[in-house]
Amino acid sequence: MMRRRIGIYGASDEVLALLPLLDANPAVEIAVIFDPDPGLVRERLRALGSERMEFVGARLTDDPKALSTVQLHAVIDSGLEPSFVERFPDAAARGVQIVAPLTARLLFGYGVSARDRKAELLQALHEVVESVNLTVDADELFARMLEIALGVTGADRGSVMLLDPQTNELTIRVAVGIEPELWSKIRVPLGEGIAGRVAADARPLRLRGKADRQAFRIVRERLDVESALSVPLVHQGKVLGVLNLHHSTRPDVFADADLEFVEQLAHLDAQIIARAQEHAALRDQAVRYAAVREVREILGGRAPLLERLTRLCQVLAARAGNGIATVYLHDPDDKELRLAATSLSGGGFGGEYRVTLGQGIDGRVASDRRPAFLRTTGDALAFAALPLLAGETLVGVLSVQAGSPAPRGRAAEETLLEVAAAAADEIAQAEREARMAARATQVSAINETGIRMITATDPADVVRLATSSAAMVLEADHAILRLQDDSTGRFVIRSYFGSADGRLQEKLFRLDKRVSVDAIKRRTAFTVRDVTSDPALEALGTGVRSLVAAPLKRDGRVIGTLALYDKVAADRFSAGAFNDDDLGIFAKFVSYVERAVANAILYAYTRQHKSFDEDTGLPNAAYLMKRIDEEIARASGRAGSFAIATCRIENLEAIVAAATPGHSLRVVRRVADALRSHVRDFDVLARTADSEFSVLMPDPGPAPDERLAELARKVADDVRKDERVNEPVRVALAFGLAVAGVESDSRDAILSRAQAERIRMV
């Protein structure tokens, strides 16, 4: 049998008194004794007796490194400052037990228990219960309890079973005579079997011979049990488990004294179990707190969220025995889980790996919002999938595949649950902050672009800015803007921004035609998150996944449409879907586009009517003056280089007074049309006053007077034939003419001569 090597940290009087017991145990070897003052220890040893001098002297050292260089099973810490754990924090990780002297006395000081040492053993157990620090490994302590019970009572087999309060079943913690592979498979419900009856009644039971199967509701009869002693482990009125002892051949092995001893032993054992469970709970709680704190520190950093999630996966994978950890984020628009981070090197498939809700373990966990745990036959964690829930909102799923050694017990599962809860809160907060930052950036970009669009005066500049800015702000692959053509009434594409060309662009424009019709009918912004769900749109074969569109209005009338197609993202290869947040941002952007288009149209209209007459569409007096100045400059004093002819409606005031409202405007337009029909193509016809028209005639030829007479006759004939404008008052026209003369002729002088009446027509 391999001896257990033990080190001593601090040679106190209590430890020195324990040395003879340890030295007498053949299963124990004292390997090293550390004390900062070896001389003082030797003086105390002389006072205790020279027989210990040689034993201690060969092992005594003042070098603490000796404890770390020797392979030890356990270290007895006598209470030096700093403590052994503080000086050697990695000792527990190396599997070294740190025990107090009292616990060491129980575990290592007695060797094989004997019937004649009952009182001494009970006293040792009592001292352990009364000790302040219970740091020994619980399984070894339970094994020592069972060893004591077997040795004192003479039983050849036995077990310590603990009660699971959640399932109300007894499970084996330690056993002698039962293969360890079977421990996790044996579960005894309260009331069933001998142990189940003892736990349910909280009373001990001693059996001689075979147990009655029907009386004890025994499912599997034990043929190797001739006598049994089963005692409940009760602490403060609560059953913690059962101590079972039995013998395979002797039906009368357990006497009344054995039952009395085992009851006392069980009483102390129950206290130790309660202390051990309390210590384990505190340790597990500390582990959970440490894990949660680490999660919050990782996810609360300033790195991009996906980097933080990758770091989280790496930490959780290490905690799970160098396994694999994966975080999926929930995409509410697509009702899918998207792989966001993994502990695997290379990052897996990134956002392109997706799991539909309800499919597989991860998908089912997301759909049901309940965790799933898979365990090995040894009750070790094999796989865990946990929903990440922030309140009622599903954030994603945390998936953990355990490695080796895998964590065991419910504490590991509870730790994962708390980690998942903390991760969900941190991820939700990070996503909220990211959305707020993105929205603030988008709003800022929209405001800046809106100002640029509104200040643009050319409609072509406005529509070009609208499509390019909309695509960039809302991360769209394509943007199309249509405006209504005044002459045809059709909505024509005025600007396209995107990557489509050739055949794909043709398909995209056909899709946009359908979407524009829908936008005009709806008269409000809308989104189609999944184009494939609409057979009519899907049939166009564009491959577009999602779109957002809106009508453009002016004074309540739809004058155009703006549509965006396919949302792109930097962290994925395929297109995403526009959501409600995108729709809100888009609607705000559309309001700027509407104002910018209206302003540009107004500017164009103003520019047009700054030089043109609104009633007739002819150039106005200001435009004609500018052209006359240009002709004067071009003539350079040459006589007869141009002429000015005038046509005045002499009785316009009488027509206004005698006719219905609007009739005078028809007269003006009819005269304008007649003049327009009979001037030369390069002549400039303008309306220079309410009742006056002027014609700039470059190169009038050798007979300007004849040209004027011919013009007057043709115009008068056209107007005379239109009876609608000659009732109730016939139109009277007066014509004048001035030919540019000498260099001293000014514009005003030429115009003044042209206004003099030469021909009058009725």
Image (cartoon, rainbow, N blue to C red):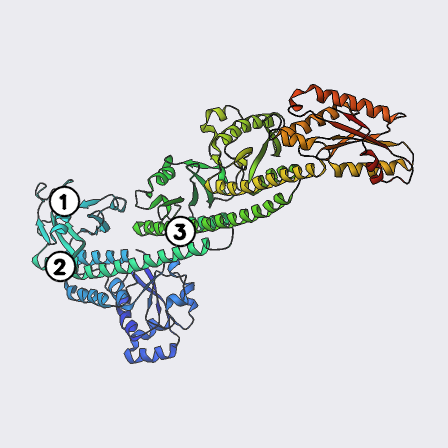
Q: Secondary structure at mark 2?
A: helix
Percent x, y for residue 195? 15, 49
Horizontally, residue 352 falls left or right of residue 105, namely right
Q: Which residue is mark 2?
A: 263
Is residue 66 in view from this perspective?
yes
Q: Between disc 1 and disc 2, whose residue precedes? A: 1
Q: Secondary structure at mark 1?
A: loop
Residue 569 visible in rendering: no
- Sort mark 2 into few (<14), some (14-19) or many (20+) by Cα contacts within 10 Å: some
Mark 1 or mark 3: name the one nearer the start of the chain. Answer: 1
Tell me which amino acid carries mark 2: Glu
Which residue carries the number 1 mark? 192
Q: State the CA–CA distance, disc 1 to disc 2.
A: 21 Å
As helix, strand or loop, the secondary structure at mark 3 comes to: helix
Q: Is residue 325 above or below residue 97?
A: above
Q: Nearer the viewer, residue 186 or 369?
A: 369
